[in-house]
Amino acid sequence: MRLSYPLRRLRPPRSRRPLAALAATALVAGALVGCSDAGGPERTLDAFLSGWRTGDLQSVGFIDPTRAKVPAAEVTKEIRQLSGELVATPPALRRTEDLEISADIATVGVRVEWTLPGGTRWGYDREVRLAKGRDGQWQVIWEPQVVHEQLARGDRLGLRRDTGPRAGVLDGAGAPIVAPRPVVRVGLQPGEVTDAKSVIRQLDAAFRAIRPAITPPVDLSGLPKRLAEADEGAFVEVVTLREEAYRQIKSRIYDLPGTKFQADKLDLAPTREFARALLGSVDPAQADDLAAHPDRYQPGDLVGHGGLQGRYDERLRGAPGLTVLVERRGPDGTLAPTGTELFKQEPKPGQAVRTTLDVATQNAADAALRGERRRAALVAVRISDGAVLAAANGPGPAGENLAFTAQVPPGSTFKMVSALGLLDRGAVTLDGPVDCPKTFTVEGRSFKNSDDFELGTVPFRTNFARSCNTAVAALAPKLGPDGLAQTGRALGLEGEWDLGMDAFTGKVSANGSPVEQAAAAFGQGTTVVSPLAMAAATAAVARGRWEQPKLLLDPVPAKSAPAGPQLRAESVEPLRTMMREVVTAGSGTALKDVPGAPVQGKTGTAEYDDNPAHTHAWFVGWQGDVAFAVFVEKGGASTASAVPITERFLRALAAR
């Protein structure tokens, strides 16, 4: 946007200018460097305007208002000094009217337009006067007011940058996720610390006892030196704790000699790990921020890093305000603002980013992962509208959003997809007999079940509930070369989604060898997915139709994927029945007594290299209107890791 500060163009009466009284007198002796009379004042003016921008004024003659000669080098130096903080971007200059010549004085209006940081334009009109000497040469009458009418010799243009308030990331209800929350600053008063080593040791033990653990741990190594260098009555801050963390250890540290406490409030998320990888963080500008965007950031600016804060940093931070002001040197030679503001652009406050996140569901997801030491993720999606309710990553306040971007094999959770494809093609029925041998061999490759179990010939629903690999591997040819991929796409996998954040939608094996088809049927081979993709596919089974997950309500993503086809009731109803039996009589029975609506789901154990003992753990399912996917990297058996996390999550939801 082109902005200009509204300045009234002033043209004081010529009678007030010292030069005017001398208009008809001769110039002082000595020719001034300038243009020939042939070009007239226009040529001198053009040379001056060009030289102002380039810094080369040697072809221009100058006099001051008393007709004293001024060297061009001195004018060049003074223009640079007057330009101050704008010196690196000289203004654009152009005439705004024709020259007015009266006797030997020429006057012309000039538009001065500066480009300020961020591309803001500041423009105003000035008046340039020229005088003609006896030799016919024209000289520019130089004074600081040529640059700006409110500048005097020794002044300079200064810039003040004012940042506006940063907007917040909102939850699905429109409430700020980050809001002022109570904290306690824990400190020591050196004069009251009788045994520094003992106090520091006890503080360290107390901080380590806080749950969830403080990450990174509180570093107390430099505290003895800080205490020794501080005044006896000073407050030497040790750490700032959320109020709930402080309450955990208050009884252990409150009466320690020298401990002092200050209550405060800071802008914080509901918990330290609350959707941390998805939200990102806001921190003071770092060296690489300043290097990459010198025109955008200055030291001390708050900058979003990672997640939504990083992706929508410009929207959230708004636009800084700019003030051009006059600075003047004081008696001690230092520059200081005079209080005269020549141009002001108010800062623009940031715009909020509204998400679909639900605080209670996110808290339940974070709490469910809290005790997990391995990398893990939990995604929850509302079935009725596809809203992402929670995206948790662990352990602790993890920085990588595995929930959205992991690319890992889905293991037996993918039997949900292959079973739907088989039902669609009439290859199986809910109660139709299907053999589940201990092993099944395809072109020399032997497939087996977890713990080498076998069921014999049992209804397909039993094979599904018990997660029989060999049964599904044997049925793979009935899906055809790309039938698995086709069914996956009907559940949204491999789609082009626009969530407003990076998300991996999956890659399903297709047109592979018989061995690859058999492996892919139970989530191995080349098939890879993300927890979000599996949560969305699971929601599609529960809903009867795939819809793209929604994360942002404002700004709304521009290219959300269209809804998928309606799933055939003759196929999806038996699949739902089988996913319920996983919980009531199969590999997910630990969830059958979870409070609330019935739980449907599917366990999964996925090999991620050539060692069958190396496996990721999965559970996907839904309860009521909430579909979810749980992933534990290198989690081993799903019943030992993913299922317990699911149980903690659902019990926490039921208790809210």
Image (cartoon, rainbow, N blue to C red):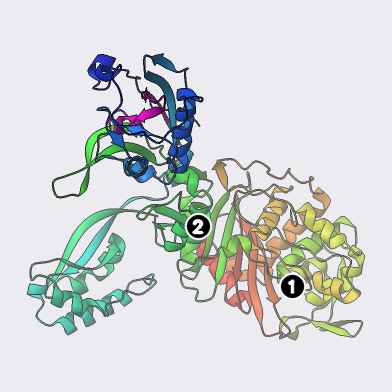
Residue 410 occupies which quadrant of the picture? bottom right
> Quick one: SS at disc 1?
loop
Residue 452 x, y percent position in the rendering: 75, 85
Return the residue nearer the eye: 139 or 173. Answer: 139
In this rendering, does residue 164 appear at all? no
- From the viewer's perspective, is 330 left or right of 567? left
Number of residues whose C-alpha sits closer than 10 Å to that of mark 2, classed few (under 14), some (14–19) or many (20 or more): few
Residue 286 x, y percent position in the rendering: 42, 61
Amino acid type at mark 1 = Ser
Number of residues whose C-alpha sits closer than 10 Å to that of mark 1, classed few (under 14), some (14–19) or many (20 or more): many
Establish if 265 lies above or below 102. below
In this rendering, does residue 156 appear at all? yes
Return the residue nearer the eye: 436 or 476. Answer: 476
> According to the image, label 1 marks what residue?
467
Return the residue nearer the eye: 413 or 267. Answer: 267
Residue 655 x, y percent position in the rendering: 45, 57
> Quick one: SS at disc 2?
helix
Q: Residue at x 53, y 76 (%)?
A: 374
Q: Where are the magenta residues, as a range?
A: 123-150
Establish if 292 lies above or below 526. above
> According to the image, label 2 marks what residue?
292
**Which mark, by number, is residue 507?**
none
Residue 94 x, y percent position in the rendering: 48, 28
Amino acid type at mark 2 = Ala
* Marks 1 & 2, CB-CB < 8 Å contact: no
